[in-house]
Image (cartoon, rainbow, N blue to C red):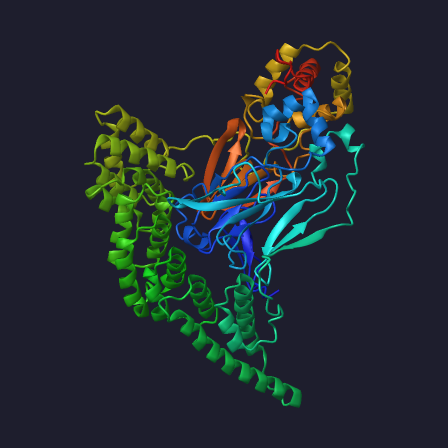
């Protein structure tokens, strides 16, 4: 309600300030319900079949600094996908697994997780990282629900370089932390309770699955709505837990709330922080208007303002002890920041704290001072700490934070990261995000003293080319003129890629012309080829996507007459040729649809729709724009050079978006080159009324449906897998 202006959000996750004053995108995307955060602020999400996905520790605000660099892949799936239920699978799951036709289809497309009746994650959701002490031995461990298996899974978090992974807890290699024999019990969400317990939301009902997963003839046999009026919340606590303090903290004054920021109970720390920040926001809302009630309100707020000042003093006291709990230090620093009271001297000691999570938070809070006079000592301390930092995850944060400085020493440290630490995943993206407008300078630095920076040069050169500055291009070509042939070829190839979406116009800079001509005449074939590819980016060419018209709009939707449709329907009654139908699939469908091991997974699941009447399937093929599956609409990106790009939106990052096109070809577009993005009520799938005969589509449908026929039994009587 307090937004100054509308906010356009991409396809990533986002966060909302509690008072409604801000909405901001964040890195990564949630797939199924829920997310989990570690003490350092790193995040896990889940999919139905993957119990944990670690999101790259590259906050959006850092990535967005350099619009010339594409956003890297941001997800690292992890965890054991097996699930060990103690309940019997629901009868519909067992019957689906026992049906050879459905088993063959689900096994070929999704693998064992969806073809077998039980034993795998199929509905992972509601993850959490336990950050309390009330349950001994569980702090820092990862939990996730598997409602279809009636269980809660536990895993230990471990660092693999900069990536967090999860692995089963000792003693639970083939069992689960909590499981029920009641098939109606479906744990869906986990959260910290006020007393340090884990609260479990049980979505208690017979069936929770999306009905599309249940064969239609089975949907009629079971209570798909049974239990819609039920549900339970469990509280997992320790038998020896002391009585918890009162959960209502709203009556505590600000001084007491400040002390609660060091509580061993996670919920109380978080609630104290929230209430302190909310009270600070309320104070300016009161002003005297002459009335007695208003006067008392103002006096009360003046008193509360004084209490807040004392609260800030208490928060600083929480930072003072050398043995202060890391959780207390983090909450105290973050709360002081939200209260507008954090200073460089508050943060500086924690840049080198023993706890990695504290160092990460301290750097994130410190870096906005790096370019200011009052942050000079803080930057000095940061540079010293960066050189000695042993933790890969913290090294990434140093590379991100140093991008806020304009000190030559910070630039030199970034170059050192590029030379020495590229083996750490995402360090390259962190350094690149810190180099907006300084890529050419970094290229020169690394060419003079490369160290281990060779893998970093192509993405760096690509970001330089994306700036569309011919004078920078000329200097880049001059720099690589004396490099090794391998380096020349790699940089030239990257420059061509960086100019892929640039306006097609002749190269005007004389120095750039000369440098490019020299490289195009190189005696090394790889250098010549790369140089000529770069030359081609300056020549006007036909648009890559010939289906686009100059206005950036797609051709009008094809319509077919009733008479034409009847001809195709009539062909369904004739003889079918499965071999010919397979040929039609490979010719017309495989560029976007996958069946078994053939084709590309661009469009939606084709075989999964084959339970429909053939006339309905025929209509979908002949008129693909009539009914488009959500998430598969055509996305149109209008470019600054007047062209347009289309495809299915796959990734929506801080600096780039990725469209996938026919054949699985991906096109990465920098946001700086995009004027606008919109989803169209059209499908990438062409209408086949003109290109295929009625008998062609009849054969195609017959072959597609043959993929649901019974699987051939193996000699020992088991289904083929």
Q: Quadrant of residue 366?
A: bottom left
Residue 619 point in image, percent of width and height: 72, 26
- The residue lying toward the viewer, choosing from 492 and 602, is 602
- The residue lying toward the viewer, choosing from 620 and 519, is 620
| Residue found 66% across the figure and 43% down from its top | 180
Question: Quick check: 337 above or below 403?
Answer: below
Position of 351 compared to 20: left or right?
A: left
Position of 440 compared to 325: left or right?
A: left
- The residue lying toward the viewer, choosing from 431 and 221, is 221
Question: Quick check: 596 above or below 340?
Answer: above
| Residue found 72% across the figure and 34% down from its top | 90
- The residue lying toward the viewer, choosing from 443 and 387, is 387
Residue 351 point in image, percent of width and height: 34, 61
Position of 30 compared to 698: left or right?
A: left
Q: Quadrant of residue 373?
A: bottom left
Furthest residue in direction front, as rendered: 240
Residue 437 point in image, percent of width and height: 33, 51
| Residue found 69% across the figure and 38% down from its top | 209
* Quarter of the N terminus within the rendering: bottom right
Q: How many numbered marks are there? A: 0
Residue 130 point in image, percent of width and height: 53, 54
Residue 425 visible in the picture: yes
* Quarter of the C terminus within the rendering: top right
Residue 620 visible in the picture: no
């Amino acid at each position: 309600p307090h937004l100054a202006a509308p906010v356009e959000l991409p396809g990533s996750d986002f966060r909302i300030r509690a008072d409604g004053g801000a909405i901001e995108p964040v890195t990564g995307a949630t797939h199924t319900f829920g997310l989990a955060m570690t003490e350092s602020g790193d995040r896990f999400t889940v999919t139905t079949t993957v119990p944990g996905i670690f999101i790259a520790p590259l906050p959006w605000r850092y990535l967005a600094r350099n619009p010339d660099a594409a956003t890297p892949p941001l997800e690292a799936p992890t965890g054991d996908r097996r699930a060990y239920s103690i309940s019997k699978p629901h009868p519909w799951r067992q019957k689906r697994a026992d049906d050879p036709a459905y088993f063959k289809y689900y096994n070929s497309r999704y693998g064992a997780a969806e073809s077998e009746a039980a034993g795998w994650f199929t509905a992972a959701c509601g993850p959490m990282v336990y950050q309390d002490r009330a349950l001994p031995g569980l702090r820092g461990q990862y939990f996730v629900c598997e409602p279809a298996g009636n269980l809660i899974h536990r895993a230990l978090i471990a660092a693999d370089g900069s990536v967090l992974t999860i692995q089963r807890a000792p003693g639970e290699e083939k069992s689960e932390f909590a499981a029920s024999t009641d098939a109606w019990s479906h744990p869906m969400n986990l959260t910290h309770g006020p007393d340090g317990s884990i609260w479990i939301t049980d979505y208690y009902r017979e069936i929770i699955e999306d009905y599309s997963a249940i064969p239609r003839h089975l949907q009629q046999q079971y209570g798909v709505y049974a239990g819609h009026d039920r549900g339970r919340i469990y509280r997992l606590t320790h038998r020896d837990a002391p009585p918890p303090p009162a959960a209502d903290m709203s009556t505590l004054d600000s001084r007491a709330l400040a002390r609660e920021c060091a509580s061993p109970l996670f919920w109380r720390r978080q609630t104290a922080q929230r209430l302190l920040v909310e009270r600070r926001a309320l104070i300016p809302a009161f002003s005297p208007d002459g009335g007695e009630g208003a006067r008392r309100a103002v006096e009360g707020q003046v008193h509360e303002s004084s209490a807040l000042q004392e609260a800030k003093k208490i928060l600083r006291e929480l930072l003072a002890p050398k043995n202060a709990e890391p959780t207390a230090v983090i909450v105290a620093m973050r709360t002081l920041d939200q209260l507008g009271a954090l200073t460089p001297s508050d943060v500086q000691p924690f840049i080198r704290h023993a706890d990695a999570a504290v160092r990460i938070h301290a750097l994130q809070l410190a870096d906005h001072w790096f370019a200011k006079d009052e942050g000079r000592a803080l930057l000095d301390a940061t540079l010293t700490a960066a050189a000695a930092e042993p933790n890969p995850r913290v090294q990434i944060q140093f590379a991100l934070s140093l991008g806020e400085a304009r000190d030559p020493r910070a630039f030199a440290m970034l170059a050192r990261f590029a030379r020495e630490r590229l083996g750490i995943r995402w360090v390259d993206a962190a350094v690149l995000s810190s180099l907006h407008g300084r890529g050419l300078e970094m290229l020169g630095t690394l060419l003079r003293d490369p160290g281990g920076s060779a893998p970093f040069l192509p993405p760096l050169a690509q970001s330089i080319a994306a700036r569309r500055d011919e004078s920078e291009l000329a200097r880049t070509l001059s720099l690589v003129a004396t490099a090794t042939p391998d380096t020349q070829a790699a940089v030239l190839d990257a420059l061509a890629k960086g100019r892929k979406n640039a306006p097609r116009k002749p190269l005007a800079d004389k120095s750039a012309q000369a440098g490019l001509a020299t490289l195009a005449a190189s005696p090394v074939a790889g250098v010549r080829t790369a140089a000529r590819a770069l030359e081609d980016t300056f020549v006007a060419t036909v648009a890559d996507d010939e289906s686009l018209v100059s206005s950036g709009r797609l051709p009008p939707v094809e319509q077919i007459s009733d008479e034409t449709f009847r001809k195709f329907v009539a062909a369904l009654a004739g003889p079918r040729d499965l071999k010919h139908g397979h040929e039609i699939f490979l010719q017309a469908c495989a560029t976007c649809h996958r069946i078994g091991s053939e084709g590309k997974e661009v469009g939606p699941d084709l075989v999964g729709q084959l339970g429909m009447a053939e006339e309905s399937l025929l209509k979908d093929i002949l008129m693909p724009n009539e009914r488009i599956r959500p998430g598969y609409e055509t996305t149109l990106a209008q470019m600054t050079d007047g062209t347009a790009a289309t495809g299915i939106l796959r990734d929506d990052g801080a600096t780039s978006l990725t469209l996938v096109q026919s054949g699985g070809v991906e096109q990465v577009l920098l946001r700086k080159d995009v004027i606008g993005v919109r989803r169209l009520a059209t499908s990438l799938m062409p209408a086949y009324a003109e290109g295929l005969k009625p008998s062609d589509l009849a054969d195609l449908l017959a072959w597609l449906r043959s993929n649901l026929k019974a699987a051939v039994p193996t000699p020992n009587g088991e289904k083929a897998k």
